[in-house]
Image: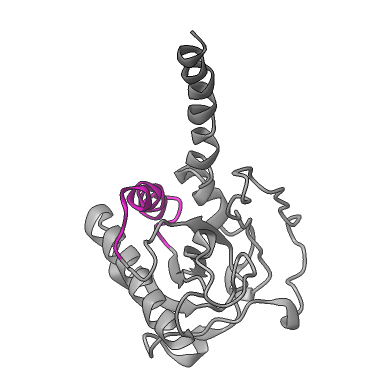
Amino acid sequence: MRSFIAPLILAPLVFAAAPAFAQSNPSADQIINSLKPTGNLTGGGTRGIRLAAPSSDGTAPAQAAPAQGASAPAASTQRRVAAAKPMAPATAQAEATGPSVNLTVNFPTGSADLTPEAMATLDQLGAALSSSALASYRFRIEGHTDTVGSKEYNRSLSERRAEAVVNYIVTKYGVQSSRLQAVGMGEQGLLVSTPDQTPEPRNRRVQVVNLGA
């Protein structure tokens, strides 16, 4: 009799864990709110909300949004952007001070192929970027990798991942390609600090930064 009771007890535990990961990424409305400027974006005085990836136990981390009008972070603390190739003038590779959002995009290790889970996430991004609220802005699409492989390989891989995201958004949602700049960041700016050769899914992500009108 006990052999039939155990599956009935364990089954709810398995399914109960799924929603925590399914809701780790923001909705289209949350992406819009995160990427909309709250001041003069071109003046560098605006900071957006950054939605981080979930922790290893599937729970969302605490998020803090700077108050409107807060000063920009010191130059030493701002993330620097390394362009994978001359897709834009060097001046466009400045520090990321615009509103931004992090998305956990499921790429298989060593691949730029979009999984069904990745497409579901990008559908939210596509809906946001094609909305009237963000129609007048340009965006940098940053591809990030984990630390598996060489730094040069990961830079190239992250560039292909960023381009895969851009192609998906342009093709499915009709967003003009001129509004999207794909950049390969490689291992730079790990969301979760890990040693070399660590396959950390949360580091295989995409960050979207508002570059202004």
Left or right of residue 56, residue 105 in this image? left
x%, y% of residue 41? Answer: 59, 68
Count the numbered circles shown: 0
Residue situated furthest top in the rendering = 1
x%, y% of residue 160? Answer: 33, 74
- Asked if residue 125 lies in the magenta stretch, the reply is yes
Left or right of residue 86, residue 92 in this image? right
Q: Which residues are magenta?
A: 113-136
- Asked if residue 200 lies in the magenta stretch, the reply is no
Q: Which of these two is toward me, 178 or 115?
A: 115
**Residue at 58%, 59% in the rendered image:** 37
x%, y% of residue 189? Answer: 59, 74
x%, y% of residue 186? Answer: 48, 78
Left or right of residue 56, residue 27 in this image? left
**Residue at 38%, 61% in the rendered image:** 107
Q: Is residue 181 above or below residue 2?
A: below
Quadrant for residue 129, please give it: bottom left
Q: Which of these two is toward me, 21 or 126?
A: 21
Q: Is residue 188 above or below residue 56?
A: below
Q: Is residue 73 above or below residue 172?
A: below
Q: Which of these two is toward me, 17 or 126?
A: 17
